[in-house]
Image (tube, rainbow, N blue to C red):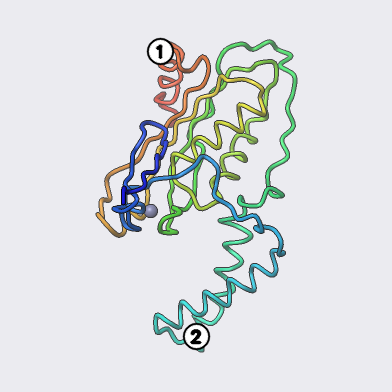
Amino acid sequence: MKPKEITLNTLHNTLEIDTDEQDIDFIGDEHISTSADTPMRADAFDITDDEKIARISYHFREIMETLGLDLTDDSLKGTPKRVAKMYVKEIFSGLNPENKPDIALFDNKYKYGKMLVEKNITLYSNCEHHFVPIYGRAHIGYISGGKVIGLSKLNRIVQYYAKRPQVQERLTVQIARELQKMLDTEDVAILIDARHMCVSSRGITDTNSATVSCFYGGKFAEEATKNEFLRYVELDTDY
Ligand SMILES: [Zn+2]
């Protein structure tokens, strides 16, 4: 039988994967994402956060006990509940559209028509293949199409999409698409420079490499505009 092929569109290239040869380690260690949307179940929000916390607590206890840990120990007994709350209320809270930040936009009254860059936005996410942290910085640029956004709101959008199990390429595209929609302009640029704990603390155990992903929409696809953005990102702001 002819092997089925799936095509994965990543930000920079298109990969053809033979499904007969793909396996979980390949998907995980090659950090492939299958879609720009976070793959969600249709019943994702049929149960409440409290029910999710109860279920995850139960299952995390099972994981710990399977590993041989004694959950009667004072230090360990609260861990299942603690992890469950952290998953639902903190590090994966961006899965729930109810937690999407309310963003107020303003008219560009000062007619500022140049690019605006907010750089070094702190980024904490988690790899969806290994559930260990991704951390780094995001840099965002946009050219107002008539609307402007509060600066801290750019951080909030980054945080919202980062608080999901992620791959860096998808995170980059999700932030870019949201900003394009919200600001009603194609002229949005994103650069994310991040380290993946699944690369440093396990697997290949490379503690030096960093992963850079980018998105250049509208005018940012033009060489001069892109270079201007990159110059601002490289500017020394150590003051
Ligand atoms: Zn990973």
Q: Amino acid at mark 1?
A: Glu
What secondary structure is found at the residue carrying circle 1?
helix
- Mark 2, residue position: 71
Q: Residue at x 51, y 35 (%)?
A: 173
Q: Nearer the viewer, residue 71 or 217?
A: 217
SS for tag 2? loop
Residue 93's quadrant in the figure? bottom right
> Among all residues in the image, which is located at the extreme front?
1
Ligand 1 under 8 Å from disc 1 Cβ: no
Q: Is residue 199 above or below residue 177?
A: below
Q: Position of residue 202 (x, y in %)?
A: 30, 60
The image shows residue 67 at horizontal and vertical percentages of 40, 80
Residue farthest along the bottom direction in this orientation: 72
Q: Position of residue 148 (x, y in %)?
A: 68, 22
The answer to which quarter of the image holds residue 151 is top right
Residue in the picture at 34% in, 50% down:
19
Q: Residue at x 40, y 13 (%)?
A: 223
Q: Is residue 57 left or right of residue 1?
A: right
Q: Which residue is mark 1?
A: 223
Are the residues at dot 2 and dot 1 in contact (C-beta closer than 8 Å)? Answer: no
Local packing at callout 1 (Cα closer than 10 Å; few below 14, some 14-19, many 20+) is few
Give the vertical position of 155 relative to 44 (above or below): above
**Dot 2 or dot 1, earlier in sequence:** 2
Mark 2 or 1, closer to the camera: 1
Instruction: Give the number of callouts.
Output: 2
Looking at the image, residue 186 sits to the left or right of residue 212; the answer is right
Q: Nearer the viewer, residue 102 or 24?
A: 24
Q: What whole-number distance in Å separates the C-alpha atoms at marks 2 and 1? A: 58 Å
User: Dot 2: few (<14), some (14–19), or many (≥20) neighbours within 10 Å?
Assistant: some
Q: Amino acid at mark 2?
A: Leu
Asked where in the image residue 50 lies, by quadrant, the reply is bottom right
> Horizontal and vertical percent for residue 226?
43, 17
